[in-house]
Amino acid sequence: MRRLAPLIALTLLAGCGGDDEPSAPSAAATATPAATTAPSEPSEPAEPSGGSAPFVGSLSVDPGDGSLVIGTGLGLLRLEEGAKKAKPFEGELATPDGAGAIAPNLVLRFTGPGELIGSGHPKDGGSDLPEDLGLIRSEDGGASWTSVSLLGEEDLHALDARGDVIVGQPVEAARVLVSTDRGRTFEERTPPSLPVDIDLDPADPQRIALTTTDGVFISTDSGGSWRQRDVATTETHLAWSETGPLYRVDAAGGVQASEDGGETWTPAGSAGGPPSTITVDAEGRLYAALAGGRIVRSDDGGKTFEQLTSLAS
């Protein structure tokens, strides 16, 4: 569910239609994971000083315990269910080619209780990991990670997973990668233009929703072809609930919901500002990261929102 349209791309770098035919598949070899190590916690919170807040590029909720993992330009944070303050943590990635700490600029997605996939970059310094981590996986809530594929090849900045299907968008590229074997291999698809965000239908992972600066597009054949369903003039973020609605939140904070897979949309409410990313948990609650490091949640389908935490120091 993450993306890099031009505006978001500049922010991250400062801190870190038609019936197109798919191009030839690009298979990625499976990496044999090495032994992993226990997690470490930074001695100081991974937050900036001077009243500023880190850029939030990823939100995902553990369906096991309801904790929210927040990916920022400065590092990973975990907000426990009911807590008011998110705590920083680091994970350790072990690969056949090297190992090191990972924390900043990761895009994350829970695929089950305590199970995560991610993509991004290693922590600066003290690591022999490549700059682009490809697709990585954790089975302990982000403490230890192993390489799945694309190590040293891709940074998947928009990422979603449903069952065996994983979809990702390489950073700043008008490309979509689709896997049907849990990320071991990928085939390349051509989107209408540079994606802003991308999401899979929980009921039918062959249905992909994608936004660009031109609007909302839907594919029913795993990205082999795309049909424009709505026009958008601003960056729009997506989150597809397992309980039914597909949500979109635009750059003004306006929330809309679709009960028919993006065919039609109904205005809901306002998130309260421009989002950098959104997500939905297993209970159908909608989360958004807003300017100033505010994380908000709606329990009523996007009509109203409450602040869960602020990452501003």
Image (tube, rainbow, N blue to C red):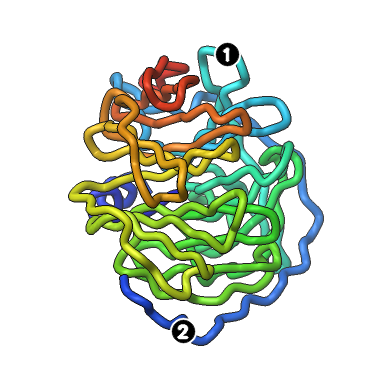
Residue type pointed to by label 2: Ser
Quadrant (top left, top right, bottom left, bottom right) of the C terminus: top left
Q: Which mark is residue 23?
A: 2
Q: Earlier in the sequence, mark 2 or mark 1?
A: 2
Query: What residue is shown with label 1?
Result: 83
- Residue 277, position in %: x, y? 40, 40
- Residue 209, position in %: x, y? 44, 55
* Residue 236 in sight in this render: yes
Q: Which element type, helix, strand or loop, lies under badge 2?
A: loop
Quarter of image, res 135: bottom right
Vertical side of 144 occupied by 39: above or below: above
Q: Residues within 10 Å of mark 1 (few under 14, many from 20)?
A: few
Q: Which residue of the protein is positioned furthest toward the bottom in this rendering?
A: 24
Q: Is residue 295 left or right of residue 86?
A: left
Q: Which residue of the protein is positioned furthest toward the right in this rendering?
A: 35
Of residue 299 and residue 193, the one placed in the foreground of this image is: 299
Residue at mark 2 to residue at mark 1: CA–CA distance: 46 Å
